[in-house]
Image (cartoon, rainbow, N blue to C red):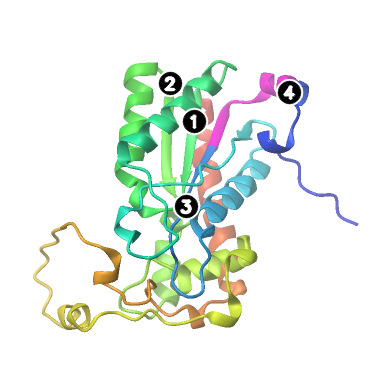
Amino acid sequence: MAQPAKRLYIPEMTWPEVKAALPQVKMAIIPVGSNEQHGPHGTFQFDTACAREFSLKLGERLYPHAIVAPAIPIGVSGHHMRFPGTITFRAETLVQVLMEVVTSLMQHGIRKFMFVNGHGGNTPALTIVVNRVKQELGCEAIWGTLPYNAIGDLSSQHAKSPITGHSCEVEVSILLALAPDAVRKEALTPGKLRPEVLAELEQPNDHVHLQRGSFFDETTENGALGDATQASVELGNLYVETALDRLVPHMLKFMEE
């Protein structure tokens, strides 16, 4: 029987075990998720489970030089608040939480930090945090929405929906590979885009991309995008393993800088 891969994951360690591991630790991986709706088939743990499980796989690849912190289970999800069950932080709250996680880990001697983000709404807060870590604390921090940001070429090849990115065939495939309990397989449903959104997609592309404030139910009636019925664990494994293969060299370089 194959032995489980080794990893350093603070929630499943004792303090003497952490103390013994720290001399070899060069980086902390901090998963950042959300508690927001993911359509009829995605549970509220969706983004947090993705960030946590991908972080653990990354920690296995980087053992014993990376330690994984507990996942932050709430993110910036105000645009999903019209769907019952969503809980959100304000952006400034998430910034403060992440800064306190970093300053805590700094007291244990860690000076490099990688935020594995599972939710697009956290983007502004994470950008602020990595800059504050460098400018105010004198440490190095990076972040990425993963594994998604490492497999854009693959997902565009396999996803056929006009709009993806939330509980779609790409996201659901990844969760089927990483955390299948986060998915209601019997309820997989295509996203139900609103007619005005579909009409806008049919307009000629003038290459001007602007953003405005919105609620998510103004885009999709059922809270999902894409077509989750096209998801598969095989695609999910391809996405996850490809992302890890691509990411690890960057992490090794970051840890040695």
Q: Mark 1 and mark 2 in contact (Cβ < 8 Å)? A: yes
Give the image location of residue 250, x and y in percent.
Answer: 49, 40
Task: Tell me if 16 is positioned left or right of 156 in this view.
Answer: right
> What residue does disc 4 label?
15
Give the mark nearest the N terminus, 3 or 4: 4
Q: Is residue 113 visible?
A: yes
Quote the CA–CA distance across marks 1 and 4: 20 Å
Where on the picture, by quarter, is residue 61? top right
Give the image location of residue 144, x and y in percent.
Answer: 42, 46
Q: 223 above or below 35?
A: below
**Residue sitting at x 40%, y 66%:** 166
Quote the CA–CA distance across marks 4 and 2: 24 Å
The amino acid at mark 4 is Trp
Quote the CA–CA distance across marks 2 and 1: 8 Å
Give the image location of residue 41, x and y in percent.
Answer: 51, 74
Question: Viewer-proximal residue, 6 or 248?
Answer: 6
